[in-house]
Amino acid sequence: MENWIRILFLTAVLGMTGCAWMPWRDKAATDGTSQSDRARESTTQSTGTNAPGSDENQVVIEPQVVRRDIKPARIDTENWEGGAYVGSLSVEDFEVNVVYGARLAYHINEDFFAEGIVGFSDAGLSSFERLSGSSPLLTDSERQFTYYSLGFGWNALPGEVFLGGRRALNSAIYLTLGAGSTHFAGGDRFTVTMGAGARVLVKDWLAAHLDIRDHVMEIDVLGKNKTAHNFEATLSLTAFF
């Protein structure tokens, strides 16, 4: 009886071991792998992409860029610039009066230019004359304030001025330094002119300027020689030719 039980037990064990090596298990594993590969290939074909690591048939996204129509600035190629200006001149000790004049410039390059200016004004009463009520120190002809200066300028900050969101004008902030002569109080006086200004190109041939200058000279009208600073602020229009 015991031998029969042993034989039955060994037969069951051998049968279970043999099932692991049956041919249909390899076929089932192969079919499972094929189905997985076919599913992956089907997914790749439906999405239009390849498997990771493949460089074939890559989909490149091209951005849709809307181009704007830009009109480049047209700047006159002429180097000469000339025009007229008007403003206010504060003659030290002689009130503030209207000044007018003309300027002529030659643009050496985009950074530097040479400039000549000439201006005319009439000085008012001095502070001594107003406070003391005495007789005038100068005659009407001696109160005429006439100057000229030759110098150079440097475009320190070239750039643009924007009007709204669709229009830009070329501009520059510049510094000037010159020397010349001033006829005032019956004599000619050596004068150093220092200034700064801003220029905006309204058209390719037309420019608007805002200038501030200091005319420095020696003067002795009140009986004592001193250095006078005569400040000037002007607006001007110039044309390139």
Image (spheres, rainbow, N blue to C red):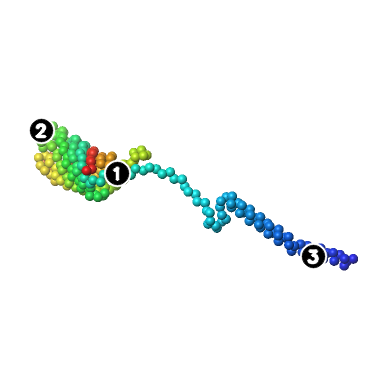
> Which numbered tag is attached to residue 74?
1
Secondary structure, mark 2, is: loop
| Residue at the spot 17% in from the left edge and 45% down from the top edge | 149
Q: Nearer the viewer, residue 89 or 16?
A: 16
Within the image, what quadrant is residue 147 found in? top left
For the residues labelled 3 and 1, the Cα–Cα distance comes to 99 Å
Q: Is residue 212 left or right of residue 220?
A: right
The crowding category of the residue bearing disc 2, from other C-alpha atoms within 10 Å (few below 14, some 14 to 19, many at least 20), is few
Q: Which of the image's four quarters has the C terminus?
A: top left
Badge 1 amino acid: Arg
Residue drawn at x 31%, y 41% as measured from the top left: 169
Could you say which disc has been placed on residue 135 in the image? 2
Determine whether the residue tagged by mark 1 lies in a helix, strand or loop. loop
The image quarter containing residue 16 is bottom right
C-alpha span from label 2 to label 1: 58 Å
* Residue 105: % across, % down: 20, 45
Camera-nearest residue between 79 and 115: 79
Q: Nearer the viewer, residue 230 or 99?
A: 99
Q: Which mark is residue 14?
A: 3
